[in-house]
Amino acid sequence: MEFRKNDYVTVTIEDIGSDGEGIGKADGFTLFVKDAVIGDTVEAKIVKNKKNYAYARLERVLKPSPFRVEPGCAYHRQCGGCQLQALSYEEQLRFKQKKIRDNLVRIGGFAPEQVDACMEPIIGMEQPFRYRNKAQYPVGTDRDGGIVTGFYAGRTHTIIPNTDCLLGAGENKEILECILKYMRENHVPAYNEATGEGLLRHILIRKGFASGELMVCLVINDKRGSGLPRRERLIAALRQIPGMTGISVSLNNERTNVIMGREIRTLWGSDTISDTIRVRDMRTPGYPFTGRELTFGISPLSFYQVNPVQTEKLYSLALDYAGLTGRETVWDLYCGIGTISLFMACSAGKVYGVEIIPQAVEDARRNAERNGIKNAEFLAGKAEEILPGLCGEEKPQAGGADVFQDAAGSYHGPLEKPDVIVVDPPRKGCDAVCLDTMLRMAPSRIVYISCDPTTLARDLKLLCEGGYELRRVRGVDQFAMTVHCETAALLERTGQ
Ligand code: SAH
């Protein structure tokens, strides 16, 4: 049977799609129904149909799923940021566990029995709200010209006013309202994407959960170079907020979707905030603290994991997987501001971190110094370009036999080959050249941290075809209420 546009169908939702939509079958026809929850029986209206499947809009829940919960946020359907908020948290975790497993089987080609034997239960959150340490709010105007901030309604650039996202820190609301008040009182225009006119584009807020420190960065379109008018008034108001540590502006005069500009100017206070991550013992139930901890400086532009509570568990798990005894050389690829590298450095002989963004490399070096860590070295450049140079087979290292010059011009060397490689790439996964070089460097262990189970499965397949075996896999829920899924995996070399 075929459906036509605007047809009404009754369907029972049996699965969750990659964007969190409900998936069900009606007469052998697959339907994707946004906002329907696994276990629901719903009435849906076909909005777009293809040969074997169709997209339908949820009209009515006829029989609610036992996993349905009342979403805490009134905007969750419009916003689309929390695709899973209407699903119970236990069911969200079950969905992610299955997603990792199914990807390893379907894309990775691993035998289901093998995956089941080495996969441990996903680590969830005790309090799955208010976990994000970073928020980026767009600023614009409503129909009446009033200044608003909130979130973009799913796939549009219309701002729905809301200053209190339930995933973010409680302080965000006060900070945003303080900025809106300053704008209204001082006639500071919001940026208009359609015309490229106006001043304030976005507000970035970061919080160090351990330190309580807050940072605000206002992204402005400042072609005239005059900055924020009467900025002392804004600074005076923001400084009153407990924890406020730094206020800055970022200049972004481009007509682009990219939020942050390249240049940051500090208006008041510090240009970084700090946060502390404690090492946990992942082999003991409850994951008690080991007593070791590391403190990092974070600037407006640096990458830093958004969920600090879960990051402790993720990094501690990576450290456990690395199985260090104090002598090993570890290479941490895609190292950002060196967080994982420094975690590893406490238990390794030597650690090298590789990162594409030079400022992040500088942050990483400062973070090493801050923690008194002397056995970590950071190289600027693309992992896939730096690694092949190290094998020393195809091209001589720049700057002499034992010396390697990185993309930022710093000299390193002689560099030691890895016993353990840790990778934590962006969603697109590792570059093929990078994977190939990892195989040639032949470390005994590879720890792969991934924020996308599909590219993880693809890359693990390749590494396992090249002489490694999957030993352990575990999800860590870094992104509760959303479909995003973080995984750690351990591979061991089997010889060859
Ligand atoms: N491990 C860090 C950062 C992970 S995010 C942490 O946990 O905080 C991934 C990082 O990879 C980003 O900092 C990004 O700038 C960097 N990156 C992206 N492509 C890269 C490449 N080709 N080579 C090296 N680093 C890269």
Image: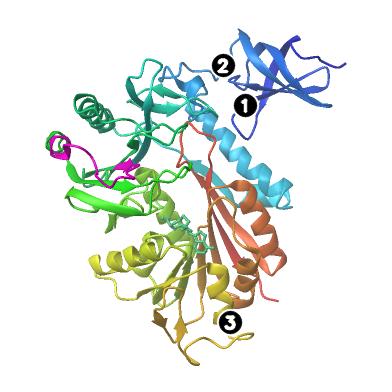
Q: Are marks 1 and 3 in contact (CB under 8 Å)?
A: no
State the residue position of label 2: 66
State the residue position of label 1: 21
Q: Say what amino acid the circle numbered 3 marks.
A: Cys
Q: Say what amino acid the circle numbered 2 marks.
A: Pro
Mark 2: which secondary structure?
Answer: loop
The mark lying in front, picked from 2 and 3, is 3
Q: Give the residue at the far right of this rendering.
A: 1
Residue 323 in percent (x, y) is at: 46, 66
Q: Give the residue at the far bottom of this rendering.
A: 401
* Between discs 2 and 3, the one toward the N terminus: 2
Residue 228 in percent (x, y) is at: 23, 40
Q: From this view, report whether residue 488 is shown above or below residue 480.
A: below
* Between discs 2 and 1, the one toward the N terminus: 1
Q: Which mark is residue 63?
A: none
Identify which residue, 210 or 137, lies in the foreground: 137
Q: Which residues are magenta?
A: 218-235
Q: Say what amino acid the circle numbered 1 marks.
A: Glu
The mark lying in front, picked from 2 and 1, is 1
Is residue 3 left or right of 342 when viewed as pictured? Answer: right
* Between discs 1 and 3, the one toward the N terminus: 1
Residue at position x 54%, y 35% from top?
483
Residue 248 in percent (x, y) is at: 24, 47
Residue at position x 18%, y 41% from top?
244
- Label 1: few (<14), some (14–19) or many (≥20) C-alpha neighbours in 10 Å: many
Residue 132 appears anywhere in the view = no
Can you tell me whether the CB of the residue at mark 3 lies under 8 Å from the nearest atom of ligand 1? Answer: no
Disc 1/disc 3 C-alpha distance (Å): 45 Å
State the residue position of label 3: 391
